[in-house]
Image (cartoon, helix red, strand yellow):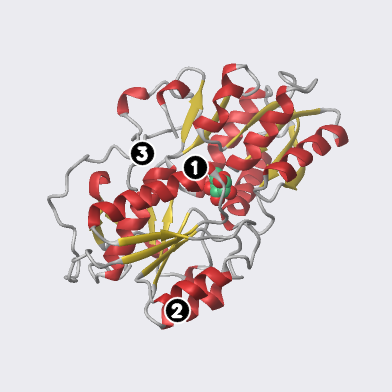
């Protein structure tokens, strides 16, 4: 059951695009578990910790990978682990799963939120019966959870995507964004910062539309077609979602726009490989979702055992990733985004 092979981003793989300031994730002291990391003296015994993982939706390879990472962490710690989730990434579709987890009395719930507010009542109820709530990937409002495990700073994620698209289109012309669901906390934060960066530093680039594919493959595919039809002058698409970028690439691949319209954003190497190899896509970015899930599970266990409370400055041990510290706003940062292109994509398998 715990067979996922996680491939850490290695330091030797650094054929990275010069446009992004990139530090590879997951290279923190592999195997070093020596400092224990307990900041306020909880029991630290994780053997009976039960953790439920609730992604935005099921059937997304990105979340399959993050769940695999969490499952591996729980396996190492000796607790129990379950993944549940809706088929649609809509604002309230996760509520019933939160309620069930609370009824079951799980120790910790790890959630990627489809909406910053819509699941807060359910999370409050879960917390009132003792469930520790940790968001990862896409946050709720901070008061609705104990901790947020952030994949990279929103500024960094926005910057790398703007750098990539502006470089690919020669820093002028029309672009569109193909996002996930309209309320997604993570995508909306990144889009806001992309808009600000475009406005401040790319006066000849015009963002003509933000479209929403709802993290659904077919919807994203159809929205790509619609964007290309509506804006004949379109030079590029940024899709800050692994579902959207893969669907958009599939559309472009067999269309008259292949090689004419640039596409970048956030994707998984396995989903994007064929499009990079055939030139439909030049470069895109992401972090390691397995590491994100793995870190989230260690952080959740540390909360459940009382090893940390989520206060700024708390430190905990995250297995092979090493030691992490809780920052401002009860947030733990995994690392920086990473750029994948034809030179390095063969080195990754997730
Ligand atoms: C999709 C989801 C997820 C996001 C990635 C980049 O898989 O929307 O929340 O972090 O893309």
Residue nearer the viewer, 260 or 109: 109
Q: Is mark 2 within 8 Å of ligand 1?
A: no
Q: Nearer the viewer, mark 1 or mark 2?
A: 2
Residue drawn at the location 56% of the way across and 32% of the way down: 271
Dot placed on the residue nearer the N-terminal end, 1 or 3: 3
Cβ–Cβ below 8 Å for labels 1 and 3? no
Check disc 3: other Cα within 10 Å, few if <14, some if 14-19, many if 20+: many
CA gap, disc 2 and disc 3: 36 Å
Residue drawn at the location 51% of the way across and 31% of the way down: 270
Considering only vertical position in the picture, is 78 above or below 238? below
Residue drawn at the location 63% of the way across and 34% of the way down: 246
Which residue is identified by label 1? 156
Dot placed on the residue nearer the N-terminal end, 1 or 2: 2
Considering only vertical position in the picture, is 97 above or below 287? below
- SS at mark 3 in the image: loop
Dot placed on the residue nearer the N-terminal end, 2 or 3: 3
Which residue is identified by label 3? 25
Residue 176 is drawn in which quadrant? top right
Check disc 1: other Cα within 10 Å, few if <14, some if 14-19, many if 20+: some
Considering only vertical position in the picture, is 55 above or below 92? above
Q: Position of residue 181 (x, y in %)?
A: 67, 54
Considering only vertical position in the picture, is 106 above or below 114? below
Residue drawn at the location 48% of the way across and 46% of the way down: 64
In screen coordinates, is 260 left or right of 332?
A: right
Residue 151 visible, this orientation? no
Which residue is identified by label 2? 103
Residue nearer the viewer, 266 or 58: 58
């Amino acid at each position: 059951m715990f067979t996922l092979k996680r491939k850490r981003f290695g330091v030797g793989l650094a054929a990275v695009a010069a446009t992004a300031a990139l530090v590879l994730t997951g290279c923190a002291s592999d195997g070093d578990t020596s400092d224990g990391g307990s900041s306020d003296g909880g029991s630290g015994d994780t053997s009976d910790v039960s953790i439920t993982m609730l992604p935005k939706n099921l059937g997304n390879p990105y979340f399959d990978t993050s769940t695999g990472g969490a499952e591996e962490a729980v396996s190492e710690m000796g607790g129990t682990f379950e993944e549940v989730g809706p088929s649609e990434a809509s604002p309230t579709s996760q509520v019933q799963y939160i309620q069930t987890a609370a009824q079951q009395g799980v120790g910790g719930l790890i959630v990627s939120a489809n909406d910053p507010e819509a699941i807060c009542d359910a999370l409050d109820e879960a917390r009132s019966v003792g469930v520790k709530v940790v968001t990862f990937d896409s946050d709720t409002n901070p008061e609705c959870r104990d901790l947020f495990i952030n994949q990279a700073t929103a500024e960094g994620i926005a910057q790398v995507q703007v750098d990539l698209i502006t470089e690919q289109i020669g820093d002028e012309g029309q672009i569109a964004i193909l996002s996930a669901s309209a309320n997604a906390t993570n995508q909306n934060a990144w889009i806001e910062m992309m808009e600000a960066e475009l406005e401040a530093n790319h006066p000849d680039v015009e963002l003509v539309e933000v479209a929403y594919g709802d993290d659904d493959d077919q919807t994203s595919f159809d929205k790509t077609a619609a964007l290309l039809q509506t804006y004949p002058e379109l030079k590029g698409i940024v899709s800050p979602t692994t579902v959207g970028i893969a669907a958009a690439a599939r559309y472009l691949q067999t269309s008259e726009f292949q090689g004419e319209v640039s596409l970048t954003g956030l994707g998984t190497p396995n989903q994007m490989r064929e499009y990079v190899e055939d030139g439909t896509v030049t470069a895109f970015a992401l972090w390691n979702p397995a590491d994100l899930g793995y870190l989230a599970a260690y952080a959740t266990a540390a909360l459940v055992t009382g090893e940390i409370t989520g206060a700024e400055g708390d430190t905990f041990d995250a297995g092979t990733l090493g030691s992490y510290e809780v920052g401002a706003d009860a947030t733990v940062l995994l690392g920086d985004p990473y750029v994948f292109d034809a030179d390095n994509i063969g080195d990754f398998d997730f």
